Structure formats: C-alpha cells, structure tokens
Image: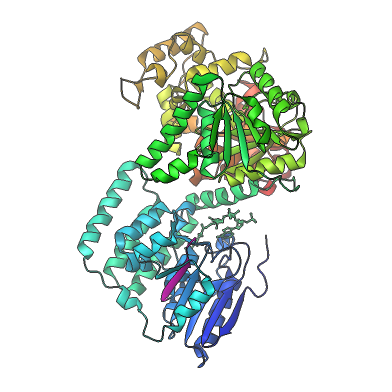
C-alpha cells in the first residue's frame, strides 16, 4: 500500500486570501492525514485576522477524486469526511473550492461543503459512489439536492457518471468556470467575497417539495420494476427524500447510517474488490516505454474489426481499415456509419463531431496502405489458414517498429506471431464484442514478445479507455486465454447438468438469480449455436474427456438460436425474449434415453454452486499455468467479458467466502463424472495444504 505523504496539505497566503493546497498523489484521495491537514489549515486560516477568505485547491492531476477507498476496511480516523465538510460549511469566512481534473465522490462533497465553487473548463465532477455499492457519505445526498434540486441530484447519484464543468454550472452546482489559470481565478473570486455567504439553512429552501416527492416515489417504483433497485440506489432515494423533509443535521445522520450499512454490505465489498482488481490487472511486468501510437491499421471490417475501428476513432486515433473488395469496404463503411448515425440520433454526438470522427477513417482494399500504421490489428475470421496468410502480408507491409496484433480468441498465438516474420513485435489483442462498447481487452503475451511491443499494446488499450488484462500464453498450453477458457468450462458444466436432468430454463433462471443478466443458454442463443459448434468440431479432443452432444444435435436440426428464431428457446417473430422450445426438451429427453442416463432433479442452488465451482477451478487452473497472473485478473475478465455480477466481485473473490479445502472436497465428489472439468487444479491443492486463500495471491 502506498504511504500518504507526511504533509499532504499546505497553507499558503496570497495577501488576504488563504490557500489550502492538497497534495496527495496520485488522485489526492481524502485519507486521514489529508483530512487532518485540511482541518488544521482551515482552523488556522479562520483564526488569522489577516485572512478574509479561503480557497481550497489541489496540486497534481486532480482535485480530490474521493475518500480514500483503501481506508474503508480500517478503523475510522478523526475528523471524518462528513465532519470536515460541516466544518467548512460553518466556517465564518467564505470558502471557495477550486476544482480541476476529476472532482469525484468525497472530493465533490468537500467542494459542496465550501460556500462557492469555481472549476476549470475541462474539470469533471460527479458522485460515483453507487459504482462501489455505497452512497455519498459526507453530505452529498443532502447538499447536492439543495444546490441543484432533488431530481437532478438523484439522477446524478443514481447514474454515478461525472458531468463536465459546463453542465455542472448550468445545473447550479458550480458558480464559475474558467478557461484561464484556475488558482488565480479562484483567488480573484475569493477577493470579491466579503459579502455574507449562503448558509446551509438558505440552501434548505424548497419551493416545491411535493413535486419532488412524487418524482422520488416514481423513481423508486421504476427501479424496483426494472430490477435495478440496488441497496445503495434505494438509500440514495431515501436520503434525497429526507433532504426535502428534515433539517440538514437529521438528513446527515440518516445518510451516515445508510452509508455505514452499504459499506458493510457484501455487494460493496465485491464492487470495491472489482475496482482494485481492475487497476491491479492493468499493471504489467513489462516496464519498457511504449512506442508512439497515432495511426492504427485494422485488417477485417466485420463486426469485430468495425467495432475496433469505432473504439479507436472515438479516442482520436487515425484509422486505416482494410477490407476485401468493394463490397467488403461498403459493408464496413455502413457498419461504422450506422454507429455514428445512432449516436447522433441519441444525442450522444453532434453531427459535426460525427463527421469529424469519420475524417480520421481511411477505408481501403489495399494492405500496402498499412506502411504508416503504428499498430496493426488483424481482425479477420477465426480461421487459421486465413489468419496465417493475412498476418504474413501484414508483416511484409508494416514499417519497422510497428506493433502487430492478432485478435484471435483460440488459435495458437506463437504460430500466428511467427507468420508475421517478426514475432517479437507481435502480440494478441483480444477484444470482446461489441468492441466499441465492451471495456475488456486481453493482451496476450507469448514467450518471444518484446517488452516494448507489450507495453505499446497495453498503452493502446488504456488510451482506448478500456481495461487491459495480461494473458501469458506458451505453445501447448490450452487455447483461449483467460475468459474463453473459463467460459468453456462453465458451458460444459451446464451441458452436463442438462444431460443429467436439468432444463435450459432452470439453468438460466439459476444463473440470473445469481446476478447474471442472461443464463448460458440465452447467451448461446444470442451468439449463435453454430459458432460454438464450429469451434468444438475444430478443436482436438481427448478420447476420455467428457463431451455432451446435445448442442451438436440441436445445430443438426438447423436451430441456431435467435437468428433462426429457434434454439434452446423459440423466438416468435419480432420478439427478443424466447419461450421454452418444447422440441429441444424432447430432443434432450431422447438423448438421455439413448445414452441410458437416468434423469435427476437439481435445485437452483445445486445448479448455481456447480457452475460457480467450475469457474473457480478453471480460474485456478489458469493461475497454475501462469496464463493469469492474479486471481483478480480472472475476476476482471469475467466481470467485463462475461457479465459476472460486479457486486459479487468475480468468481475468485467469491471463492474466498469459503475455503480452498472445501472447494477441493466438492470438486473431488464430482471429479469422476468429468475428470477433464472437475479434477482440482494444482493451485487449489496447494492453497488448501497451506491454508491460504486466493486473496493472498493478489
Ligand atoms: N481511493 C484510493 N485510491 C484511489 C482512489 C480512491 N478514491 N481513486 C483512485 N485511486 C488509485 C487507484 O487505485 C490507482 O492506484 P494504483 O496506481 O496504486 O493502482 C491510482 O489511484 C490511479 O487510479 P486510476 O488508475 O484509476 O487512474 P485514472 O487516471 O485512470 O482514473 C479516476 C482516475 C477517474 C479518479 C479513477 O481512479 C476513479 O474513478 N477513482 C475512483 C473515484 C471514486 O469512486 N470516488 C468515490 C470514492 S468513495 C467516496 O468518496 C465516499 C465518500 O462519499 C464518503
């Protein structure tokens, strides 16, 4: 854990204005030492007769981005952030907060404790606590409604997404926005402030509390109906309602109690784990400086290639996209164009922004245009011969020093890298569909990859605003990096349950009950059964490995899922939700009879536990092989790539709610049925022997 600097807060003076300057890199989180420093500086400034007003500001990349989340599991230190905000609010001299960077969570609450707020044009402000399963706990739920009205406040806290300084100013949250020097502007602002400043009581006036109350009720009902009513969301609504009804002191007490309750909840612990796991995953052992990147070449303009192109355009890269023939180019252009048309129609982009983004796109049929690309990503179909041929051509065309990447999900990376003629410069960049939205990218590293090629790929992922997870692959180690290996085990386990007596809808219901948006068979229908079928057919299989033929039999009927309106479910024309497919149930029953399998019944809990156990074992196997470096990396992949509920932290985090010894025993009970799936991974045995947990390896 990083130590906070010894003196993270300084008190400076510019004439009659005192400046409280926070410096606690990297994000000026408001840990105990910072809070004590601010409190001491505030008292000193208040007591100094030469000081007429106070500015709170921060050095470095941002105004505080929140409370220090690492302190949440430690004993409370005085003053609490809530106390500090009240101290600021009740200060007898005007206090101005000067915001830059990302003033989030407790940082914004601190600023709302101040009497005025000035922000630089590019600042962003927000209360993202809900993403950690908590609510603002330092007065945010009480002060934000008083500043911007209950509805806007509620929307901002429920969405958890930051807004720009300009929008915040329109809302009434920021008093001034400056494009010039923030500190100078803040000091000038403070000099104007000899007048009395607004007090908490004044902020407490609501002209139309009844209308707001009706809105909060409607919002609560809507959340419950859509199934998005998390504990934190409901508490936010309760607290906003309190802000409308009771004095601020009472509202603050209520908020504090709600905050403590949420903080202790398993969902907040899971979400906090996910937050740190994601950041730990982004740390790669390769520390070579990344190479410069400005132009990205992409070969293949199908769904994946077009999605990657959009992701790159969105972040300001120049893109050269190569497709085959005129029709390939037109289809790719249509895909990308449709994306921008929709974004404009939904108001996410202006027409000018959409048009500007497209000027950075070059669509062509010629691979020899890739000579000026800094990174070239191969994103053609998952066909080894095709990929080998394209990668060879990419290797022929790329300039020296360019980083080459393949988007393969299963094929042998080493073999593909060699096809380029420059394996050292080649890595795997496995984007997840839809690539313009999904935040996960597995960066696959083979034995001969150059450290700077890996760092460049990692830097690209970060600049795309995505989450990079490193997968170390060696020839001979199972195909499919991290996510697809866990997924494959999960699917096989579900198929075994299906063969033994469960129905697709029972399995899907169990996993939805656990928190997945969709169960494995709904996902299979959505992705198309033919894709997984082709993959199964093309991969080598041990003769004694357990294999379930049900999916192949369904494909043989021509039922490929949503695209043919029939798969595990039937999809009436125009419907997205399926109804159970009676023919599939008959097919499964006939399959059991043919194979002499006696139908068993499973409870939802048994189904869920078996599938979770399977994911944990697959994760432990990946850690044993060194494909994944940390249990948190597996969690990050499963959350972002496969919709594992974030509030549960991921399968490896969840595994620590029990013990490796217990997990082993349960696997051993299943092992004989499918040794390829349920033989406990060596790492599990090791942890059980040493009485350690997965968390000890993060
Ligand atoms: N507490 C402790 N550490 C934090 C932190 C926080 N609030 N926010 C970020 N960090 C750490 C990260 O763990 C990371 O540490 P590492 O280098 O050791 O891995 C480092 O700061 C840099 O973070 P990022 O890699 O995320 O940097 P980015 O530049 O990509 O993003 C950010 C910066 C937008 C500020 C992002 O870090 C972020 O979203 N942080 C969380 C913001 C948040 O949730 N604030 C609310 C906290 S809860 C709260 O305030 C409760 C209050 O209501 C009482």
Q: Position of residue 430 (x, y in %)?
A: 61, 33
Taking the magenta stretch, the answer to whether it contains residue 119 is yes
Q: Quadrant of residue 492?
A: top right
Taking the magenta stretch, the answer to whether it contains residue 116 is yes
Magenta highlight range = 115-122
Taking the spot 24% from the left edge, 60% from the top edge, the residue there is 213
Taking the spot 53% from the left edge, 48% from the top edge, the residue there is 270
From the viewer's side, name the closer residue of 145 and 218: 145
Taking the spot 59% from the left edge, 38% from the top edge, the residue there is 441
From the viewer's side, name the closer residue of 619 and 441: 441
Identify whether 438 is placed above or below 529: below
Q: Position of residue 97 (x, y in %)?
A: 48, 73
Q: Quadrant of residue 147?
A: bottom left
**In the displayed structure image, the side of residue 221 where residue 508 appears, left or right:** right
Identify whether 475 is placed above or below 26: above
Quarter, ligand 1: bottom right
Q: Can you see residue 342?
A: yes
Q: Position of residue 50 (x, y in %)?
A: 52, 92
Q: Residue furthest top?
A: 594
Helix, strand or loop: magenta stretch: strand
Q: Position of residue 369 (x, y in %)?
A: 63, 30
Identify whether 333 is placed above or below 591: below
């Amino acid at each position: 854990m990083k130590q906070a600097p010894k003196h993270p807060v300084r008190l400076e003076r510019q004439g009659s204005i005192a400046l409280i300057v926070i410096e606690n890199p990297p994000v000026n989180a408001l840990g105990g030492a910072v809070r004590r420093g601010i409190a001491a500086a505030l008292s000193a400034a208040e007591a100094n007769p030469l000081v007429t007003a106070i500015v709170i500001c921060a050095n470095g990349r941002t105004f505080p981005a929140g409370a220090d989340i690492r302190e949440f599991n430690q004993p409370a230190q005085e003053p609490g952030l809530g106390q500090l905000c009240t101290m600021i609010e009740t200060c007898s001299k005007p206090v101005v907060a000067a915001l830059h960077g990302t003033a989030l969570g407790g940082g914004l609450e601190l600023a709302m404790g101040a009497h005025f707020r000035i922000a630089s044009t590019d600042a962003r402000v927000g209360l993202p606590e809900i993403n950690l399963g908590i609510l603002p706990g330092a007065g945010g739920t009480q002060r934000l409604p008083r500043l911007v009205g209950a509805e806007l406040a509620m929307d901002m806290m429920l969405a958890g997404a930051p807004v720009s300084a300009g929008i915040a100013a329109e809302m009434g949250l920021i008093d001034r926005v400056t494009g010039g020097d923030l500190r100078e502007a803040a000091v000038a602002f403070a000099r104007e402030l000899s007048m009395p400043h607004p007090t908490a009581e004044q902020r407490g006036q609501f002209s139309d509390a009844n209308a707001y109350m009706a809105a909060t009720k409607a919002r609560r009902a809507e959340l419950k109906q859509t199934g998005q009513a998390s504990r934190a969301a409901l508490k936010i609504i309760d607290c906003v309602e309190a802000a409308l009804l009771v004095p601020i002191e009472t509202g603050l007490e209520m908020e504090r109690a709600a905050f403590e309750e949420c903080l202790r909840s398993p969902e907040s612990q899971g979400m906090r784990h996910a937050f740190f796991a994601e950041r730990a995953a982004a740390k790669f052992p390769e520390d070579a400086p990344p190479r410069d990147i400005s132009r990205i070449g992409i070969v293949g303009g199908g769904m994946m290639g077009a999605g990657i192109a959009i992701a790159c355009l969105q972040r300001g890269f120049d893109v050269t996209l190569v497709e085959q023939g005129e029709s390939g180019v037109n289809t790719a252009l249509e895909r990308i164009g449709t994306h921008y048309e929709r974004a404009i129609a939904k108001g996410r982009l202006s027409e000018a922004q959409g048009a500007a983004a497209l000027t950075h796109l070059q669509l062509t049929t010629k691979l020899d245009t890739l000579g000026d690309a800094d990174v070239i990503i191969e994103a053609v179909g998952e066909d080894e011969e095709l990929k080998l041929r394209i990668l060879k051509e990419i290797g022929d065309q790329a300039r020296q020093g360019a980083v080459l990447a393949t988007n393969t999900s299963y094929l042998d990376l080493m073999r593909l890298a060699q096809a380029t003629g420059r394996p050292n410069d080649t890595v795997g960049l496995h984007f997840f569909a839809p690539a313009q939205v999904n935040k996960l990218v597995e960066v696959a590293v083979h034995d001969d990859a150059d450290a700077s090629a890996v760092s460049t790929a990692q830097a690209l992922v970060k600049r795309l605003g995505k989450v990079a997870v490193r997968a170390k692959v060696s020839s001979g180690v199972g195909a499919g990096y991290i996510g697809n290996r866990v997924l494959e085990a999960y699917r096989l386990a579900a198929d075994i349950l299906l063969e033994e007596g469960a129905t697709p809808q029972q399995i899907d219901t169990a996993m939805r009950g656990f928190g997945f948006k969709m169960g494995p068979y709904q996902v299979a229908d959505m992705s198309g059964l033919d894709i997984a079928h082709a993959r199964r057919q093309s991969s080598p299989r041990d003769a004694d490995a357990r294999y379930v033929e049900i999916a192949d039999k369904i494909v043989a009927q021509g039922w490929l899922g949503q695209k043919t309106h029939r798969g595990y479910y039937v999809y009436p024309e125009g419907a997205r939700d399926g109804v159970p497919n009676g023919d599939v149930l008959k097919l499964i029953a006939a399959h059991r009879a043919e194979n002499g399998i006696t139908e068993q019944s499973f409870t939802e809990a048994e189904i869920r536990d078996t599938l979770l156990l399977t994911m944990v074992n697959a994760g432990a196997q990946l850690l044993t092989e060194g494909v994944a470096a940390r249990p948190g990396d597996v969690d990050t992949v499963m959350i972002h790539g496969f919709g594992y509920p974030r509030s549960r932290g991921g399968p490896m985090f969840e595994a620590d709610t029990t013990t490796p010894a217990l997990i082993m025993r349960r696997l051993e009970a299943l092992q004989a049925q499918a040794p390829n799936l349920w033989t406990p991974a060596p790492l599990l045995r090791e942890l059980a022997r040493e009485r350690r947990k997965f968390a000890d390896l993060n």
